[in-house]
Amino acid sequence: MLEVRNLICAYGKVMALKGISLKVPDNKLIVLVGANGAGKSTTLRAISGLVPAASGSIFFNGQEITGLTASRILSMGIAHCPEGRRVFPQMTVYENLELGCYLRKDATGIKKDIDRVFDLFPRIAERRKQVAGTLSGGEQQMLAIGRAIMSRPKLIMFDEPSLGLAPNIVEQVFEIIKSIRETGTTILMVEQNAFAALDMCDYAYLLEAGSMALEGSGQELIHNPHVREAYLGALSHA
């Protein structure tokens, strides 16, 4: 479904991505792991059109999307659930969900999908008229995931969905992400909880300093000595 080829991205003179390549097959859950500053979020931002590529190519369902606008990429079926939730704090839960489908015109389908989000997240259903900025961190993450679903994407990219959440909420969020995949939506996820991410994914890539260091199934990376020493020692017991 998605293929990144030799992607290079820079912020001024700082090289954030140094020619990375990856593939995301249809209906799979693929994760990117690595230390802070490795280039994981930049990869997602480049795919969604928020960061320009200095060189390299990005293909979605066989069509090159490198250089397209973020709204055009969204309309093609790629949704981006960003790090830090980024809900609209002065708008209600319901209004945030409506903004997730601003490119759609099918009123009946929109109503059905809002009901689906509320079924997935009963806690935000109870707060549908509440201003989003007053929600807890976990509730805001649920809203951000719901907003991403509203565009009916073929691929959802999650950037650090567990960041700053209590352990019981993290477990709930991961279960929701797995259930979204089970409905046929492809997922590319960046996650700082490397052990949990590798344990739930179909395939994984390890980014180090803007370069692709390793790839393999989640279990292969979990049992890789370098990954275990560098990334799983503290995180697997967190």
Image (tube, grey):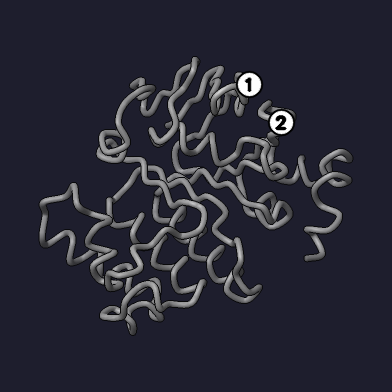
Q: Is residue 142 above or below residue 216?
A: below
Residue at x-position 68% and y-position 27%? 212
Earlier sequence position, callout 2 versus callout 1: 1
Quadrant in which the C terminus is drawn = bottom right
What numbered label is drawn on residue 125?
none
What secondary structure is marked by label 1?
A: strand
Q: Residues within 10 Å of mark 1 (few under 14, many from 20)?
A: some
In the image, residue 181 lies at what x, y percent?
46, 53
Which disc, if any, is residue 209? 2
Which residue is painted at 81% across and 52% down in the image?
A: 232
Does residue 48 appear left or right of residue 203 in this picture? left
Q: Exactly how many numbered labels are in the figure?
A: 2
- Where residue 192 appears, as percent x and y from the top left, is 67, 52
Q: As drawn, is 45 to the left or to the right of 39?
A: left
Q: The N terminus is located in which quarter?
A: top left
Identity, as a three-letter code, of the amino acid under mark 1: Lys
Please report contact status of discs 2 and 1: CB closer than 8 Å, yes or no.
Answer: yes
From the viewer's perspective, is residue 48 above or below residue 143? above
Residue 18, label in figure = 1
Q: Position of residue 64 (x, y in %)?
A: 36, 20
Q: Residue at x 40, y 61 (%)?
A: 144
Residue 89 x, y percent position in the rendering: 35, 68
Helix, strand or loop at disc 2? loop
Instruction: Report which quarter residue 61 is drawn in.
Output: top left
Cα separation between marks 2 and 1: 8 Å
Q: Amino acid at mark 2?
A: Ala
Label 2 neighbour load within 10 Å: few <14, some 14-19, many 20+: some
